[in-house]
Amino acid sequence: MDRGELVIKGIRQGLLITLGEGSWEDQLAQLERRLSQGATFFRGGRAALDVGDRRLGPAEIDQVCELLARYEVELWALLSPRDETALAAARKGLAVTLAQKEPEAPPLDEPVGALVVRRTLRSGQRIHHSGDVVVLGDVHAGAEIVAGGHVVVWGKLHGTVHAGAMGDEEAVVCALDLAPTQLRIAGYLARSPEERQSRPVPEVARVRDGKIEAVPWHQR
């Protein structure tokens, strides 16, 4: 992995964002790209930021707080082995270790891994998971799935789905009847054609040549 690459992963308290090597400005630019690609996934979340051995003061901490806030993400902890940075974070009211007791709030997502949903999702129901999502049932119009990884529906997919919501363009969406109201993969958006096949066939949607395309499973 590129040592300059920013890493985002799910933890029990929400998200852990670990900055890579490189300038502060470059890492903030990377962070903004990732947040914009997965805006629906991150919205309403809470994050701990590991800045490594960087020397940060109040201005830099305010800068990253404001960036996260634009995407409705709350920064609750800032991690660094450097005393000056940890002190500046503590003075801003941020936790400086993951072991510290954090404010009461629901976690953004469940532990990374496949989430299997053994029921039909009806209008108004929402699944939000940082790994893959498998639904053994239908997804009705008005229901929504947001996943950090792949989405597989062993039934009819007529609701809204966002796979690869943290920016993974390799994610796919599969269904026995793929007719979503709206389909997103990473930062790409597609809608179902108005005319559907009279006899739907299982399809897989993925990003190819800068757009989302859906093909029958046997043509993958």
Image (cartoon, rainbow, N blue to C red):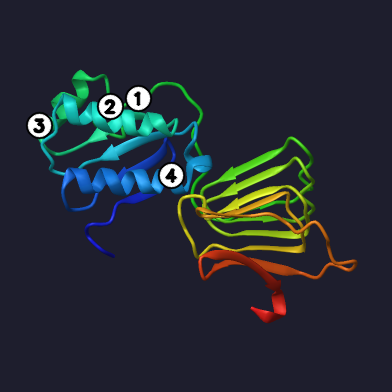
* Real-space Cα separation, disc 3 to disc 2, in angstroms: 13 Å
Task: Work out whether 129 lies above or below 124.
Answer: below
Marks 1 and 2: CB-CB under 8 Å?
Answer: yes
Residue located at (19% from left, 19% from top) = 91
* Real-space Cα separation, disc 4 to disc 3, in angstroms: 32 Å
Provide the secondary structure element on which disc 2 rests: loop
Q: Position of residue 6 (x, y in %)?
A: 29, 52
- Residue named by callout 3: 83
| Mark 1 or 2, nearer chain start | 2
Q: Position of residue 206 (x, y in %)?
A: 59, 66
- Residue named by callout 1: 101
* Real-space Cα separation, disc 1 to disc 2, in angstroms: 8 Å
- Residue named by callout 4: 36
Which amino acid type corresponds to the residue marked 2 in the rendered image? Ala
Marks 4 and 2: CB-CB under 8 Å?
Answer: no
Residue toward you, 61 or 97: 61
Position of 194 compared to 129: left or right? right
Q: Residues within 10 Å of mark 2 (few under 14, many from 20)?
A: many
